[in-house]
Image: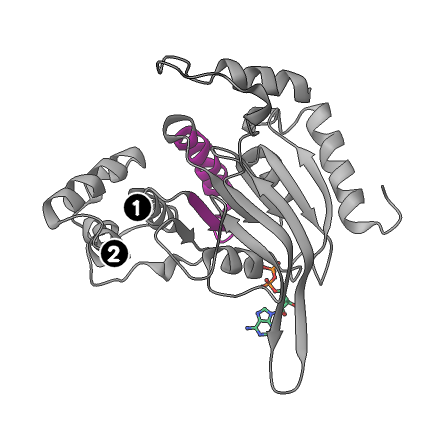
Amino acid sequence: MAELALRHAVSATPLRTPGAVAHPERVAPPQPLLQVDGVSLEYRTPERVVRATHRVGFDVHAAERYVLLGPSGCGKSTLLKAIAGFIPPVEGEIRLDGRRVTAPGPDRIVVFQEFDQLPPWKTVRENVMFPLLASRTLGRKEAGERALHYLDKVGLSKFADVHPHQLSGGMKQRVAIARALAMQPRVLLMDEPFAALDALTRRKMQEELLALWDEVRFTLLFVTHSIEEALVVGSRIALLSPHPGRMRAEINSHAFDLQSTGGAEFQATAQRIHHLLFEETAQ
Ligand SMILES: Nc1ncnc2c1ncn2[C@@H]1O[C@H](COP(=O)(O)OP(=O)(O)O)[C@@H](O)[C@H]1O
Ligand SMILES: [Mg+2]
């Protein structure tokens, strides 16, 4: 397997530069885009220290849909905040493109669960433009164009000039996704983005997210406590134990989509995950 990967990497090496010589032994395997390496996270209050995660480690490669799955309180949101750069690890390290994450940056954008993440006094288009302007990524004209481009991708170009209160919960989440994608981050971080939606809208949003991923191929780190959502949305899933969160297993889920939810293999995998998450003795 490793040999195969190496051969593939060698054949992909450009050999056209005059005088260039291939050195197979120097071809490094592709570096993961995001590396979470033995990360422990804590909250310190004057009275006590709460350990949210304990030595959690995983790698996310470009264009993966990586899911963090675990029960409420296992530290998923805390991990996402640490990756976003808001909470420093007390142990271990988080690296993006090999560089240690020490602060928030436009290369990591978070979409939250709450519907009120959009300032209500800005129109939909202005909401999407705002981070592009605030980070000086683009000027007004280009930001406006890029905002419309991503609003179109989430099916909301007709709503560009309305205010968030005129939108449903699902539409507000689409705006938040467009706003995040417009920044063209290295990793899109989503913290239970559909958890507050009704079941039908949630399913529709999962479907749309997958269609959007098919088109744009962004790298996604998605947090959920729903086993079914993890299997549908993810290509790989990290299972975290209850508080404090530790890595319990990694599951390959690229074979599943919304069409497979009723199938025997999907149900069997969901069962297996359930055992891994909730039974101490399970392997
Ligand atoms: N601001 C905070 N101060 C102290 N403890 C916190 C704070 N936020 C979260 N926690 C604790 O850290 C643990 C992990 O929380 P969280 O990351 O929100 O879990 P999840 O997102 O998996 O539900 C929980 O025990 C929670 O009570
Ligand atoms: Mg959470």
- Image x and y of residue 74, in percent: 67, 59
Q: Are marks 2 and 1 in contact (CB under 8 Å)?
A: yes
* In the foreground, 81 or 88: 88
Give the numbered dot on residue 183.
1
259 to 34, vertically: above or below = above
In this picture the colour scheme is one colour
Q: Which residue is at 76% across, 30% downward? A: 268
Classify mark 2: residues with Cα within 10 Å, few (<14), some (14-19) or many (20+).
Answer: few
Q: Amino acid at mark 1?
A: Met
Judged left or right of residue 28, residue 48 is: right
Residue 97, x across and y down, in percent: 47, 43
Mark 1 element type: loop
- Where 265 falls versus 81 (above or below)? above
Kindly give the residue lying farthest to the right in the view shown: 281
Q: Position of residue 18 (x, y in %)?
A: 35, 13
Instruction: Please name whichever residue, 96 or 119, is drawn nearer the observer in this view of the structure.
Output: 96
244 left or right of 93? right
Please indicate, yes or no, whether residue 3 appears anywhere in the rendered image.
Answer: yes
- Tell me the element at label 2: loop
Name the spot of residue 132 as percent of width and height, x first: 23, 51
